[in-house]
Amino acid sequence: MAQNLQGKVALVTGASRGIGRATALALASEGAAVMVNYASSSSAAAEVVAEIEANGGRAIAFKANVANSDEVDKLIAATMEKFGRIDVLVNNAGITRDTLLLRMKLEDWQAVIDLNLTGVFLCTRAVSKIMLKQKSGRIINITSVAGQMGNAGQSNYSASKAGVIGFTKTVARELAPRAITVNAVAPGFIATDMTDGLKADAILQMIPLARYGQPEEVAGMIQFLASSPAAAYITGQVFNVDGGMVMA
Ligand code: NAP
């Protein structure tokens, strides 16, 4: 397989589990050195690093809450100190705090916006300074079908993910003159801890391909956008990996 990220560095937020974990492994398979960010699962993050190293790659794990500006600065500083550059940023870390609008507490609203939207802003702002100097870079933001079509019980999450789409398009325009691409990937229902425990029957009826996606299927799209020479002319777009749920 071509190793398009040989000598390059990728930072993946929320890479200890689920889609982020699969993405870290996929980018490492392209030759990238990977910064594996996590919030609390230190042993899971260490396992991702160990798996990358066992395959001959380079990675380190770093604990940082990416909703916190100071912790983001430390994450970026640690990445630069260890690897010296950042070529790929995958803004993947995300949470849900689901409940219907009338029952939603301000804390539930704020926690989701703070991580899913403000966290994307903080990481992108910090990394874009480095990419602007390098005059290259690829940024991939993980949004959701919920940000495109809405989902009852997820007003906070849908708003955060719709915000990520607007942010992606604007930043894509701002960074395009320096050959930095910015795209979003919109998963549907993917089998991770986030969707564990959801009622499967009702969900499967909404999915034309009639199954949950696997984290590796989302990571495949991220890998293409992050590493393929063929993706150099793609920016400001949203790519659905959702079994056909959203057909624009
Ligand atoms: P997941 O399995 O719940 O994993 C979430 C990851 O985010 C973990 O690595 C977690 O770290 C990390 N994280 C949580 N809070 C963080 C914080 N404050 N700072 C840094 N990292 C933090 O989630 P997933 O299903 O893989 O989802 C990944 C992304 O895809 C999210 O943005 C999600 O909204 C989006 N998405 C998922 C689906 C789906 O069906 N699963 C669908 C559409 C979109 P710890 O392990 O340390 O807690």
Image: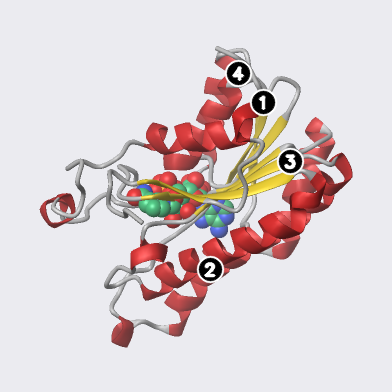
Question: Pointer 4 and pointer 1: residues touching (CB < 8 Å)?
Answer: no
Q: Residue at x 44, y 59 (%)?
A: 95
Which residue lies under the disc numbered 1? 32
Which residue lies under the disc numbered 3? 137
Is ligand 1 less than 8 Å from the beta carbon at label 2? no
User: In the structure shown, which secondary structural element does the residue marked by tag 3 occupy?
Assistant: strand
Which residue lies under the disc numbered 4? 53
- Real-space Cα separation, disc 4 to disc 2, in angstroms: 36 Å
Of callouts 4 and 2, the N-terminal one? 4
Q: Nearer the viewer, mark 3 or mark 4?
A: 3
User: In the structure shown, which secondary structural element does the residue marked by tag 4 occupy?
Assistant: helix
Q: Nearer the viewer, mark 2 or mark 1?
A: 2
Question: Pointer 1 and pointer 3: residues touching (CB < 8 Å)?
Answer: no
**How far across and how far down the image is residue 221, in percent?**
47, 36
Q: Which mark is residue 163?
A: 2
Is ligand 1 less than 8 Å from the beta carbon at label 3? no
**How far across and how far down the image is residue 212, in percent?**
25, 42
Question: Can you say whether 56 is above or below 138 in the image?
Answer: above
Give the quarter of the image for residue 121. Answer: bottom right
Of callouts 2 and 3, the N-terminal one? 3
Of callouts 1 and 3, the N-terminal one? 1
Q: Disc 2 residue type?
A: Gly
Seen from this angle, which residue lies furthest bottom?
A: 102
- Real-space Cα separation, disc 2 to disc 3, in angstroms: 22 Å
Q: Disc 4 residue type?
A: Glu
Of callouts 2 and 1, the N-terminal one? 1
Of 228 and 9, nearer the camera is 228
Q: Disc 3 residue type?
A: Gly
Within 10 Å of disc 4 (Cα), the crowding (few <14, some 14-19, many 20+) is some
